[in-house]
């Protein structure tokens, strides 16, 4: 059981559409349930369309703020949900790439699930890391210098910062536990 995370500040970043519903909703609710402060940023504040299994529209979530208005200095962890369209769009957002890079340079943890590691590939952050993802990213991760494994959750501390990754929504309990353990250990 993860301790209370009072005062921990988590940043979740997405695009405006194509976000896998449970990969956004569940970690957010889990962190809020542990009393963390959670901010959801997207290219623009406001509506973010979520999906289930990349094809079925689900609820519209609300981004609290724009990517341009957040800084890694103000947060303790970066969380990157998946969804094929979300991840593909997010990795083309210069501010999203800049944020991921800033978290890693500051030695702050990043947690990415499903297709979320595409952002880390784009940012050049997977070289020397062992990670998991949705299986279709295996070649991209390998080509970027990372080692891909098929496990529910992987925690890699190489290169001075922690990367937590999981494969899909079925791994969310393990993903959330790993996030909580990382944040509690850093307190």
Image (cartoon, rainbow, N blue to C red):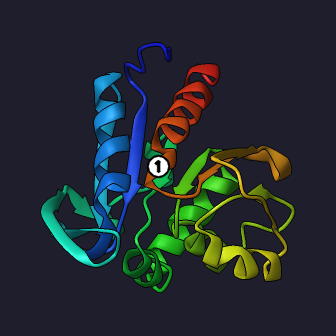
Residue 93 in percent (x, y) is at 43, 82
Along the viewing direction, whichever of 183 and 174 lies nearer the viewer: 174
Residue 88 in percent (x, y) is at 46, 83
Residue at image position (56%, 50%) is 111
Which residue does the numbered mark 1 point to in the structure image? 170
Residue 106 in percent (x, y) is at 66, 49
Q: Is residue 16 visible?
A: no
User: Counting other residues with Cα less than 10 Å from the Cα at mark 1, is it few (<14), some (14-19), or many (20 or more)?
Assistant: few
Specify the quadrant of the image occupied by residue 57: bottom left
Work out whether 182 lies above or below 164: above
Q: Is residue 141 left or right of residue 116?
A: right
Specify the quadrant of the image occupied by residue 48: bottom left
Q: Is residue 90 visible?
A: yes
Residue at image position (28%, 37%) is 29
Work out whether 153 lies above or below 124: above
Q: Quadrant of the C terminus?
A: top right
Residue at image position (22%, 74%) is 56
Residue at image position (79%, 44%) is 157
Residue 81 in percent (x, y) is at 43, 59
Task: Give the SS element for disc 1.
Answer: helix
Q: Is residue 94 left or right of residue 16?
A: right
Along the viewing direction, whichever of 128 and 174 lies nearer the viewer: 174
Number of labels in the image equals 1
Along the viewing direction, whichever of 139 and 161 lies nearer the viewer: 139
Q: Is residue 140 left or right of residue 63?
A: right
């Amino acid at each position: 059981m993860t301790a209370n995370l009072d005062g921990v500040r988590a940043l979740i970043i997405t695009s405006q559409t194509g976000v896998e519903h449970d990969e956004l909703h569940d970690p957010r609710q889990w962190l809020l349930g542990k009393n963390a402060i959670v901010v959801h940023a997207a290219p623009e504040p406001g509506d973010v369309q979520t999906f289930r299994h990349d094809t079925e529209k689900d609820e519209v979530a609300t981004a609290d703020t724009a990517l341009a208005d957040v800084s890694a200095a103000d947060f303790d962890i970066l969380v990157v949900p998946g969804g094929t369209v979300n991840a593909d769009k997010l990795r083309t957002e210069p501010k999203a790439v800049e944020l991921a890079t800033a978290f890693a340079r500051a030695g702050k943890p990043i947690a990415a699930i499903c297709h979320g590691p595409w952002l880390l590939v784009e940012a050049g952050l997977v070289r020397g890391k062992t990670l998991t993802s949705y299986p279709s990213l295996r070649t991209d991760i390998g080509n970027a210098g990372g080692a891909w494994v098929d496990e529910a959750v992987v925690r890699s501390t190489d290169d001075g910062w922690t990367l937590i990754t999981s494969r899909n929504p079925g791994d969310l309990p393990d993903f959330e536990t790993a996030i909580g353990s990382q944040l509690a250990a850093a307190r």
